[in-house]
Image (tube, rainbow, N blue to C red):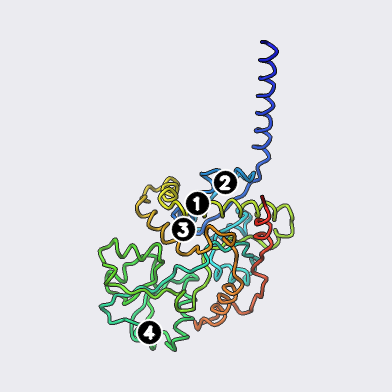
Amino acid sequence: MIKGFAFRRGVLLAALSVLALQATAAEKVTLQLKWLPQSQFAGYYVAQQKGFYQEEGLDVTIKPGGTDISPVQVIAGKSADVIVDWLPDALASREAGVPLVNIAQVYDRSGMMLTCKKSTGIKTPADLKGKTLGVWYGGNEYPFFNWMNKLGFKPGKDITILKQGFNVDPLLQDQAACISTMNYNEYWQLIDAGLKQEELINFPYEDQGVSTLEDGLYVLGSELKDPAFVNKMAKFLKASFKGWDYAVKHPQEAAKIVVEQDASGAATEAVQTRQMENVAKLITNAGTAKIGYLDPAAYRRTIDVLLHSGGDTPVIKKDPGDAGMTHAVWDAAAKLK
């Protein structure tokens, strides 16, 4: 009896030792988000809460963003291993000296739109002429300028631009005929404010052929020279994709997980569930082996938009070629069992 007890105790201690060793051996990864906790980033929170990162031997810290937080500055200061960013900002930052490289593109469609009140007489893009249009700046204006350039509309002459804050007030207060919105966020703020869907018309940038790639994952190019870093990021991608697949299939549960991460207490499950359902429309490869794969054609389209935005100054002066992207980490993630 005593021998049996001693044997079981030895097995238990050995098992605990293995678990302790695994815990200490977990590789640390810090992810910097582009904005505050919301379903826009649900896949990462789900991967963390469901233990998908732990399954890959990773200890992941997810840092929320905010109005005063620049993911580019965070990673440039070596306070993050990987960031969520939009490709226009990443390429502009790359040209400015921060060697960002896209290692995965979770969102393969753009959620950006111009939303207009039908009462202004706008039915087609041609009707935008002579109107006041709300436009986000800070890197979000480039597809808009490219679109206006294609339509032959000159700002200040054919259209009036209102520099829009990250709210929907200009449309609610009739300061503009149209405003910038995301399909998963600001558009629904208009509905929540009392406008009816039949009162609005949307012009998704994706449909106008001027969309740029949004939420992708970026690392410093210099880090990719280290095989150990590439392997760590491959495991991060594998777990993150698993998190996104789960979030798309279970929007309500994903929303609940996101709400738990909101320290302000402002997020609600109803709003975050709706946001998750619309975010899912931008991840058309979810549930397939292609999730997170950066389409070279979409990458090229974004570069063309930035080079020919039609704004006061080009976003980027030189074509970066393929230097701003790599499939190496995605390929490595696909090979992991």
Task: For the residues labelled 1 and 2, say whether their Cβ atoms are less than 8 Å apart.
Answer: yes
What crowding class fits label 2: few (fewer than 14 Cα within 10 Å), some (14-19), or many (20 or more)?
many
Looking at the image, tell me whether mark 4 or mark 1 is earlier in sequence order.
4
Closest to the observer, 70 or 246: 246
Looking at the image, tell me whether mark 2 or mark 3 is earlier in sequence order.
3
> Is 238 left or right of 163, judged from the image as shown?
right
**Where's residue 153, x and y in %?**
42, 87
Closest to the observer, 51 or 5: 5
Looking at the image, tell me whether mark 2 or mark 4 is earlier in sequence order.
2
Q: Amino acid at mark 4?
A: Ile
Q: Which residue is mark 2?
A: 52
> Is 26 left or right of 306, judged from the image as shown?
right
Give the mark toward the camera: 3 or 4: 3
**Where's residue 335, x and y in %?**
68, 55
Q: Which residue is mark 1?
A: 246
Q: Which residue is mark 4?
A: 159
Give the mark toward the camera: 2 or 3: 2
Q: CA distance from mark 4 to mark 1?
A: 43 Å
Looking at the image, tell me whether mark 1 or mark 2 is earlier in sequence order.
2
Q: Amino acid at mark 2?
A: Phe
| Residue occupying image coordinates x 65% and y 42% | 26
Q: CA distance from mark 2 to mark 4?
A: 49 Å
Helix, strand or loop at mark 1: helix
| Residue occupying image coordinates x 62% and y 64% | 102
Q: CA distance from mark 3 to mark 1?
A: 14 Å
Q: Amino acid at mark 3?
A: Gln
Give the mark toward the camera: 2 or 4: 2
> Is 188 left or right of 309, judged from the image as shown?
left
Image quadrant where residue 292 sits:
bottom right
Q: Which residue is mark 3?
A: 40
Q: Amino acid at mark 1?
A: Tyr
